[in-house]
Amino acid sequence: MAAWKKQLGAVWAAVWIGLPQAAAETVTVSEPPPQMIIRRSHGEVEDPARLKAITDRSNHLFSLFLAELSLQRGNAAPALGTYLTMLERTKDTEVAERAMDMAVGLSAFDVAESVYRRWVALEPSPGAALRRITWARNMVRGDFEQAAAEWDGALSQADDGRQRQMFLLAAQTAVQSRQAAAVLEDKIHRAALARPEMPEAAVADAVFSVLNDRGSRTVAALHRLAAADGELLPPTELTLRLISRRRPEILGRFFQSAELPKLPPVWRELRVAALAADGKTDEADALLKQLLAEAPSAELYIQAALLEGARKSGRAQTVHYLERAYRSGTQEQQSRAAVAAVLAALEDKDIAAAGKWLARIRAAEYAFDKLFLQAALARTKSEWGQVRRLAEQARAQPSQEGRFFTEEDFFGLYLEALTREQDARRVLPVLNRLYREAQRAGRTERALDVLYRRGLLYADRLNDSRAALADFRRVADSRPNTESLNALGYTMLQVPGEDLERAFSLIQTAYSQEPESAAVNDSMGWAYFKRGDARAALPYLEYAYRELPHGEVAAHLGEVLLALGEKERALAVFRQGLAGEGAELVRAAMRRLGIKLPAAR
């Protein structure tokens, strides 16, 4: 849009002074009096038609300028509407290109398709911009064979900035579609090799290579990426996360083949994280101390804090490093350190410290993460209404993803708040609706989240264990993780006639996945007790109650202690359980067992 942009400055100078605040919201294009005649100083009469054309163009430019202002203020929909109106008036392909950018950014794909068709009609012989947009359209639509055929031509006609965008769009699409990763792999690889100094090209090559299990290609792409991006830009960070999840050993191969002293500082810091993730904490600690001695930085202090957390050295040392990072870092680093400190405080249930560090998250790019952590803090305090309100506030954010947390993380908190805060019978139809919506949208993971939460509602609040079992079985069949296996196994223990040994096996599998989970330890202890082995049950339940002093765990531990003849300890546990969350479960267990607490002295 160079032709339009060059004139926006002049429009700014001419008309901005005195422009009302609301002008960016409502755009009107006034027409001049039809017969206005302007006389030049030497007496020549200006042509009215030419004057009208100039005036129209100025008005069009002004409207586009106001649309850009509206977009900057977060009012994307009115801005797009203005561009669509201007496209009809001007028939300008540059306006079409900008309207396409806006529509795709808003995920208004029907509007984008309409703009594309209008653009094709305006430009029967496609130029460079339309060829590039056609390629992007085919990528979004899933026509990857056609996109592969168009790649070389569209890329060769694009300028440097647009080429970078094309590589990033290709990488993003490959992550979402294995077919795209397979079809375009060789095209992307050859184009990336021809652009060794372009970080985005190396990012795309690394992404396509790791998705296609090309270890050597991925390592080579990482070497080019380290040389081209010494700052670790966001696309590079995302690429490294993808590789660490899919093929973590590739990062080890990269660092082993690299000359560490020649790597940019931020990449050497990454080596610390890679060693820690690989469980080599002593090596990571030694390298970190070396780097801190050479040039201490906020980034290194954050790494040191994370390493202390991984080594479980205690929160005091972790917070010490995070404080040093906060004092010396940029606003982004300060906010990242604060996020880590909030997480550490929440893990220790230190509500005051979590609130203090939350207030120190100020960088704009962490706004979504801050909302999530505020909701997590409210969850710790059982403020379910606040959790739900924050989740609704998050849905109104322009971006549904932070640096650490995503919309799906927030949705999980929202589901928990929904099922905890409101009447169970009223919540059930809401969960049913959310499940249907997730299914229709093809969001399998979200549908499973709703099923899991509905199962808990059936089990914990509606006393319908068989309905809960049906939901938990569906979740465990599709997503056999710790939560689903534990929920299914534990619920089977509660239902007469269910296979006790099968339940025990499910809980054992959950325990092997997450042996430090208090909920799983509670299930393990209860399963042993149900099998008649109270002695084996005891250590699991004692651990669970230390970590999660909830009434349900207290009821289990108290009953096992009674079975072992330790009545005084059992009564003490029951008394503690009656004073905390889940006290009704303790009372129910005591009634069933015929236990009455002696009057307090």
Image: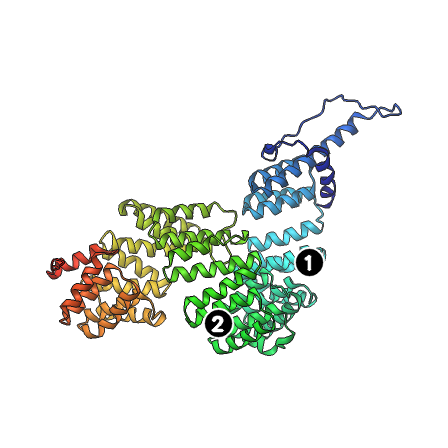
- Per the image, the residue denoted by label 2 is 277
The image quarter containing residue 599 is bottom left
Q: Of the residues tagged 1 and 2, which is closer to the observer?
A: 2
> Within 10 Å of the Cα at label 1, are there few (<14), some (14-19), or many (20+) other Cα atoms?
many
Residue 415 visible from this viewpoint: yes
The residue positioned 58% from the left and 34% from the top of the image is 25
Q: Which of 16 and 299 is in front in this view?
A: 299
Earlier sequence position, callout 1 versus callout 2: 1
Q: Nearer the viewer, residue 265 or 94?
A: 265
Determine whether the residue tagged by mark 2 lies in a helix, strand or loop.
helix
Q: Which residue is most to the right?
A: 42
The amino acid on which the numbered mark 1 sits, given as a three-letter code, is Leu
- The image position of residue 109, as x and y in percent, is 55, 46
Q: In this view, does 220 lie to the left or right of 519?
A: right
Q: Taking 130 as reference, is 272 above or below it? A: below
Q: How many labels does the image show?
A: 2
- Per the image, the residue denoted by label 1 is 155
- The image position of residue 428, as x and y in percent, is 30, 48
Q: Which residue is most to the front?
A: 601
- The image position of residue 488, as x and y in percent, is 29, 63
Q: Nearer the viewer, residue 36 or 211?
A: 36
The amino acid on which the numbered mark 2 sits, given as a three-letter code, is Ala
Q: Tell me the quadrant of the picture where the C terminus can be found.
A: bottom left
Determine whether the residue tagged by mark 1 lies in a helix, strand or loop.
helix
Of the numbered discs in the image, which one, if any, rests on residue 333? none
Q: Taking 316 as reference, is 410 above or below it? A: above
Residue 431 visible from this viewpoint: no
- The image position of residue 436, as x and y in percent, is 37, 49
CB atoms of marks 1 and 2 within 8 Å: no
Q: Taking 349 as reference, is 82 above or below it? A: above
The image quarter containing residue 548 is bottom left
